[in-house]
Amino acid sequence: MRIELGNVSKHYGKIKAIDNVSMTIDPGRIVAVLGANGAGKTTILKILSGVTAPDTGEYLLDGDPFRRDRTDLRRRLCCLPDFPLLFPGHTVLQNIAIYLNLYETSREGTEEWVVEVLTQLDLLSLGDAPIHTLSRGQAYKTALAALLTVYPEVWIFDEPFASGMDPQGIEYFKEQARTAAAQGCTIIYTTQILDIAERFSDWVGILDEGELKHWGTASEMKALAGVEQDALARLMMRLRSDS
């Protein structure tokens, strides 16, 4: 699925969250949206996932204008915010079943795949545990398991490397993301950590105060941090020191 944002802006009162951002994301990319707190990262994800609409600008999925009532388009993507939407009184397996129903997922081998994913995420023994009894990391892994079960074309994550997942969960997420990208899926995630964006992405956007300061490959980002790009170099130094 090709994703296009054209001159997108979003304001909350007098606060400029996103200002005139344009980007095109082709299928099969792992994209890091990098920036400090308040840079506009979460707002970009809210727009991409349909949680909020831009004030101005255009958002297209495969050339179609994205609207919140386009359930056919919404089912082609899945977003895990910082605290994913789960039903705390329901069990791990019940939450996965809810996702399967919402996404109308019905294909051969789904049950076996759920068992495989839960095993890899060390959640199989917690299948009947209510979400409210789990740790934050376990709850996030439950949401990740649900996403992997419905397996949409576009995966959207807000700070997955600060989600509370254990190293096993993080490595499994990275492994599955690389596999999905190789199959043509698109993975978009936010982070404040420059080293993560350099190591685990092939395309990077750098936001600062709602403006897109850089949009290109990870290798291009490294090359731009030179004397000829003083403002970007200072921003990247600040991000590296913050991490």
Image (spheres, helix red, strand yellow):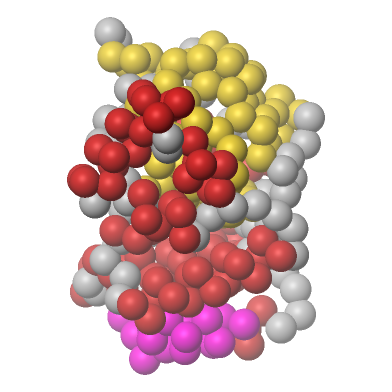
Answer whether residue 128 is magenta in the image: yes
Q: Position of residue 103 (x, y in %)?
A: 63, 56
Asked whether, in this view, residue 180 is left or right of residue 41, the answer is: right
In the displayed structure, would residue 184 be above or below residue 167?
above
User: Residue most toward the top?
Assistant: 14
Tag count: 0
User: Residue most toward the front?
Assistant: 227
Asked whether, in this view, residue 192 is left or right of residue 72, the answer is: left
- Quadrant into which the N terminus falls: top right
Task: Give the quarter of the image for residue 107.
Answer: bottom right
Question: Which residue shows up at 59% across the image and 38% down it?
Answer: 216
Asked whether, in this view, residue 178 is left or right of residue 137, the answer is: right
Report the magenta stretch's main SS: helix
Q: Position of residue 169 (x, y in %)?
A: 39, 76
Answer whether residue 214 is magenta in the image: no
Q: Position of residue 85 (x, y in %)?
A: 38, 53
Asked whether, in this view, residue 11 is left or right of residue 221, the answer is: left
Q: Position of residue 133 (x, y in %)?
A: 21, 74
Instruction: State which region is magenta.
Output: 113-131
In the displayed structure, would residue 195 be above or below residue 212?
below
Between 1 and 205, the one lying in front of the other is: 205
Question: Which residue shows up at 66% across the image and 39% down it?
Answer: 25
Say whether residue 204 is visible: no
In the displayed structure, would residue 75 be above or below residue 237?
below
Task: Give the quarter of the image for residue 73.
Answer: top right
Say whether residue 60 is visible: yes
Between 47 and 126, the one lying in front of the other is: 47
Task: Give the quarter of the image for residue 113.
Answer: bottom right
Between 137 and 191, the one lying in front of the other is: 191
Question: Which residue shows up at 42% across the image and 35% down it?
Answer: 226
Between 90 and 141, the one lying in front of the other is: 141
